[in-house]
Image (spheres, rainbow, N blue to C red):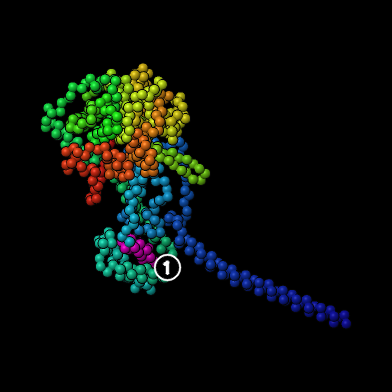
Amino acid sequence: MKGGGGGGGGGAVSVTTGKRRWRSLVIGVLFLVILSMLVPLAFLLGLHNGFHSPNPNPNGYVPVHKTSIVSDLKIYDKYENSETFNHAENSKIAGTVAATGRGGVDENENCELKFGSYCLWRREHREEMKDTMVKKLKDQLFVARAYYPSIAKLPSQDKLTRALRQNIQEVERVLSESATDVDLPPGIEKKIQRMEAAITKAKSVPVDCSNVDKKFRQILDMTNDEANFHMKQSAFLYQLAVQTMPKSLHCLSMRLTVEYFKSPSVVMELSQADRFSDPSLHHYVIFSTNVLASSVVINSTVLCARESKNQVFHVLTDGQNYFAMKLWFFRNTFKEATVQVLNIEQLNLESHDKAILIHMFLPVEYRVSLLNVDGPSIHSKMQYISVFSHLHYLLPEIFQSLTKVVVLDDDVVVQKDLSALWDINMGGKVNGAVQSCSVSLGQLKSYLGENSYDKNSCAWMSGLNIVDLARWRELDLTKTYQRLVREVSMGEESKEAVALRGSLLTFQDLVYALDGVWALSGLGHDYGLNIEAIKKAAVLHYNGHMKPWLELGIPRYKKFWKKFLNQEDQLLNERNGNVYLVSRKSGIEFPGGEYRS
């Protein structure tokens, strides 16, 4: 009994052990089956992500983008080096990189910080994408070129290889002869359909994705190189446009000079020497080489004045434009105001460096970029500030009999009577100016040095300045300025940097802050100014590259300048004098602005 019972128990244990082994085997097999399904799936997903990766690096890794934070700000001369501008219109290759936008240009970046006012002008004048057929052909050519090398390696796809090669050659020939949809030959729709069919078939053929990916990246790199070339070329042409005198203005100046020497006896200096030196009159000083610009300043000031007989304007120019200026202001009268034209090359300034004075006699402008770091994002703000040049510091010597003058830049327009400026009590201050408190002297410490000055003091602006010459002579500020210039000129700083430091530090604690309604600046670079604020301002300052006499000027602000232009002059009604107002639509000729540096 016991022996039989023992045998039965041993059989039950054996059956139980066998079932456990069978279950373990089933679980192991199921795990292997699931694993065999997951591994290929993960491999396929990896290829898919690698093929469609937005990473433009041909080596397959994502580069680390380093963000550089600039302390305080950057200073630029009024006309920056064109090599720093590499952001231009990419119209020739638009559409060839459909997956990456316009040649890799990031439209969300703050282009004004990197490329200055060119970027603002480009955005303002951008046109909607046209010629969609040409764009589609470029996109198809881009994709076909990427697939062709991989398809050509497959012996079984000879027919598809020939079809791709034939379509690529046809599209290349069409694009070489056609730049717009209007230029496309008849039957282009059938060519597009054949190319699309060939590309669709090529996509359905199993190929080595890495080869196609490499080809895409090679074509993308070449396209980006071409885009960068056109960007730099366009930016250079923009810089050239704002640094050179427009052809029409140059022709006007030359024509006036020729007319002057044809009959020099006609242009006689009227017997008004007593008015030029009468301190009881209102004297305005303008530094300019632009005939029309200085004429608009004087005309707007006179027309907006309640009384013009006590106004005297002193226009200081160079020898090249002296005779043109002289004839222009002889031909044109400005109510009862008096205009005197002076040649800076003929002034008795032997004790000073005349070469520097001639080169640096116009107000100097600087583009200032302010970087504000707010967490992970960096915000930038652009400001243009303008200060006196070297020649401004000889005003007490040039006008020895005068006690007070108003200095106007030639890129301003006067909209209200300025006679109230002579009634302002500046309390011992020398320079009455509108201040730009968005830029403090502390932010300019890399250019001003660590001198003892108020870091929170605001930078002042030229454009509209009332200058107390008597107080200037009493403090001998010209000597102070020359000392500051000598301290800096021993280094490698440019003349413009010297003028910035010297001007801001010379008038430290001597600037009388004018109310903001006296002058509104920014019309030469800021598209977002309020029209009501423009109409209320007494003086409009077109500081920046986009001067109102240029085609590059901001269109919505030009009307405030043009209405004071004397269109009745015979020379302006003739061919050479009227071109600057006409938009050029043909050729590659660019208008430009005078060199003011």
As drawn, 504 above or below 526? above
Kindly give the residue lying farthest to the front in the view shown: 306
Q: Quadrant of the N terminus?
A: bottom right
- Magenta stretch bounds: 133-151
**Residue 161 or 242: which is nearer the viewer?**
242
Kindly give the residue lying farthest to the top in the view shown: 474
Residue in the image at 34% along x and 46% along y:
121
Q: Which residue is mark 1?
A: 207
Kindly give the residue lying farthest to the right in the view shown: 1
Q: Residue 146 lies in magenta, yes or no?
A: yes
Q: Residue 229 lies in magenta, yes or no?
A: no
Q: Main secondary structure of the magenta part?
A: helix
Q: Is residue 374 left or right of residue 113?
A: right
Q: Is residue 490 left or right of residue 564?
A: right
Residue in the image at 37% along x and 18% along y:
475
Q: Quadrant of the C terminus?
A: top left
Please tell me in which quadrant of the rendered image residue 517 appears.
top left
Residue 578 visible in the snapshot: yes
Residue in the image at 39% along x and 22% along y:
425
**Residue 213 or 573: which is nearer the viewer?**
573
Q: Position of residue 300 (x, y in %)?
A: 28, 34
